[in-house]
C-alpha cells in the first residue's frame, strides 16, 4: 500500500478508460442534480412551514418541560431533514458556491480530535501536513465535510482497527500527470490524501464508489451520499480526485485542489442570525410566493417583527401591487413560481418600475436561471449571491430582511 501522491498516478487506467468513467459519473450526477433540485423546492417549502410554525408556537405558548422537549425534538428532526436536502442539492452543479481563502492544514488539525473521538485504541491517526502549504479558494464547510467523509470512509474500511493517515502537500503537475485524468489541468495544486490500511476495494466496487446512493454498508448504516458529495465538491472546486485501492491492501484517496491565485476571495456572509437579537422594523414588505402556507407563515413572522405586509401569489400579481402602492420598501420573492415570469424576471421588471426598491430573493431549490446568471447581469448576480435559502428560521429571516433594508444601493 502506498501513500505517495506520485505513486497513486501510476495505478491509473489508460486515459480513454478513465475519461469514459468520468463522463459516465458526470452524467449520473447531472441527472441526480436535476431530479433533486426539483424535488427540493417543494420539500424545503414544507420544511420551512414546519420549522417556522414550531418556532412560533415555542414563542407564543407557555409550555411545560415535556412539551417543550417534544417540540425541540420535532424541530431538530426538521433541521436534520433540511441538512439532508442540502446534501442532495450539493449534487446539482447549479448550486452557487461561497468561497473564501482557506488554509487546509488548519481544518485538518481542528478535525483530528473529532475524527478520533469514536475510535478505539485499535486505531491510529497519523497526520503528515506539509509546511508552507499553499492556500486554496473553496467553501470551508464543504472542505470540512470532504475530510470528514473520507476519514469516516477510511474508518469503516478498518473494522478491526488500523492506521488512518492524512497528508497534505504542494504539487506542481505537468501535462504528463494530468493527461491520465480528463478533468485535470497542469498547474499548482494542494494535494490532500486520506489513506487507510483496511480491507481495500475490488475494481468493480471502485468503479461505483462515487455513484449517488451506492454503498457497501448494511441497510440503515449509511446514505451512500458521502463519496458522491466528495466528488461533487472536488469538481465544483475545479479539482480532481484519484483513488488507489486493492483488496486487503487498503485505500488512498488523493484530492487535488487548485492553488489560490490573485487577491483574497471571501464572499461568505456573516452568520449574525444565530447569535443576534431578532432584527425588527416598520417598513412595508411585499411577499411573493405561490405556496399559501409559506405566505401565511411569512406574514405572521414579519408582522411579529413590526413590519407591514402585502401578499401576491405570482409575479404578475406582484407587479400590479407594486404599480399601485408606492410605499413598498422591500420585495421578498420566491425564485421558482408558476406563470411566464419567475422571481428573477420579477426582480428585473420591479427595478424598472421602482429603481430604489430593495429586493430579497428566497428559494428552496439549487436552480438558477441560466439566461440571467450567464448574462453577467449584476442585479441578478447580487440577488442570487445573497438569497435567503429555504427552509429558514425566524432569526435568519429577521437578519436577512433588516440587512437588505439597511443596505445602500
Image: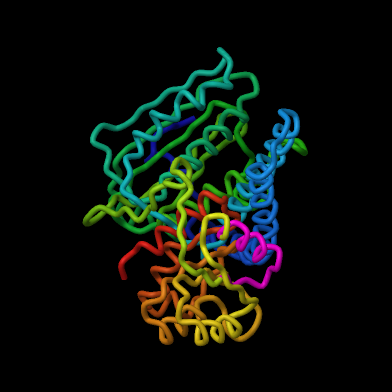
Q: Does 52 appear above or below 116?
A: below
Residue 102 visible to an observer of this rendering:
yes
Q: How is the protein colored in the picture? A: rainbow
Q: Quadrant of residue 90?
A: bottom right
Give the x, y percent position of residue 43: 69, 59
Residue at 64% over, 46% down: 55
Give the x, y percent position of residue 285: 51, 69
Residue 9 visible to an observer of this rendering:
no
Front residue of this view, candidates 43 and 388? 388
Residue 338 drawn in magenta = no
Front residue of this view, candidates 152 and 48? 48
Q: Is residue 253 left or right of residue 378?
A: right
Query: Magenta region, mostly helix, strand or loop?
Result: helix
Q: Does 22 appear above or below 195?
A: below
Q: Is residue 134 left or right of residue 367?
A: left
Quadrant location of the C terminus? bottom left
Front residue of this view, candidates 93 and 206? 93
Residue at 72% over, 41% down: 74
Residue at 68% over, 56% down: 49
Give the x, y percent position of residue 91: 57, 57
Give the x, y percent position of residue 199: 62, 29
Amino acid at each position: 500500500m502506498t501513500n505517495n501522491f506520485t505513486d497513486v498516478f501510476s495505478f491509473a487506467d489508460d486515459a480513454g478508460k478513465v475519461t469514459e468513467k468520468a463522463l459516465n459519473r458526470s452524467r449520473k450526477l447531472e441527472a441526480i442534480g436535476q431530479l433533486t433540485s426539483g424535488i427540493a423546492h417543494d420539500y424545503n417549502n414544507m420544511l420551512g412551514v414546519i420549522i417556522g410554525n414550531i418556532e412560533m408556537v415555542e414563542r407564543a405558548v407557555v409550555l411545560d418541560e415535556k412539551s417543550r422537549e417534544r417540540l425541540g425534538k420535532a424541530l431538530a428532526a426538521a433541521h436534520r431533514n433540511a441538512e439532508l436536502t442540502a446534501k442532495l442539492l450539493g449534487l446539482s452543479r447549479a448550486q452557487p458556491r461561497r468561497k473564501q481563502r482557506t488554509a487546509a492544514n488548519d481544518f485538518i488539525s481542528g478535525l483530528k480530535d473529532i475524527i478520533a473521538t469514536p475510535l478505539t485504541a485499535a486505531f491510529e491517526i497519523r497526520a503528515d501536513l506539509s509546511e508552507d502549504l499553499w492556500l486554496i479558494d473553496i467553501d470551508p464547510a464543504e472542505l470540512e465535510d470532504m475530510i470528514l467523509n473520507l476519514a469516516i470512509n477510511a474508518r469503516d474500511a478498518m473494522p478491526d482497527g488500523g492506521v488512518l493517515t492524512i497528508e497534505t502537500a504542494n504539487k506542481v503537475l505537468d501535462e504528463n500527470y494530468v493527461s491520465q485524468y480528463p478533468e485535470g489541468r497542469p498547474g499548482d495544486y494542494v494535494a490532500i490524501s486520506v489513506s487507510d490500511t483496511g480491507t481495500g476495494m475490488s475494481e468493480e466496487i471502485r468503479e461505483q464508489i462515487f455513484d449517488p446512493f451506492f454503498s457497501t454498508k448494511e441497510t440503515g448504516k449509511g446514505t451512500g451520499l458521502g463519496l458522491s458529495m466528495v466528488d461533487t465538491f472536488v469538481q465544483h472546486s475545479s479539482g480532481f480526485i484519484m483513488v488507489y485501492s486493492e483488496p486487503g491492501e487498503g485505500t488512498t484517496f488523493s484530492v487535488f485542489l487548485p492553488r489560490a491565485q490573485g487577491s483574497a476571495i471571501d464572499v461568505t456572509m456573516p452568520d449574525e442570525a444565530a447569535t443576534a437579537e431578532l432584527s425588527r422594523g416598520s417598513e412595508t414588505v411585499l411577499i411573493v410566493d405561490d405556496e399559501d402556507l409559506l405566505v401565511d407563515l411569512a406574514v405572521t413572522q414579519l408582522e411579529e417583527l413590526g413590519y407591514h405586509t402585502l401578499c401576491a401569489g405570482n409575479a404578475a400579481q406582484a407587479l400590479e401591487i407594486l404599480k399601485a402602492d408606492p410605499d413598498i420598501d422591500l420585495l421578498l420573492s420566491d425564485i421558482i413560481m408558476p406563470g411566464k415570469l419567475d422571481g428573477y424576471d420579477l426582480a428585473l421588471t420591479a427595478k424598472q418600475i421602482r429603481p430604489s426598491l430593495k429586493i430579497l430573493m428566497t428559494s428552496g431549490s439549487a436552480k438558477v436561471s441560466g439566461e440571467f446568471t450567464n448574462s453577467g447581469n449584476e442585479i441578478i448576480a447580487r440577488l442570487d449571491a445573497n438569497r435567503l435559502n429555504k427552509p429558514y428560521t425566524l432569526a435568519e429571516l429577521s437578519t436577512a430582511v433588516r440587512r437588505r433594508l439597511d443596505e445602500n444601493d
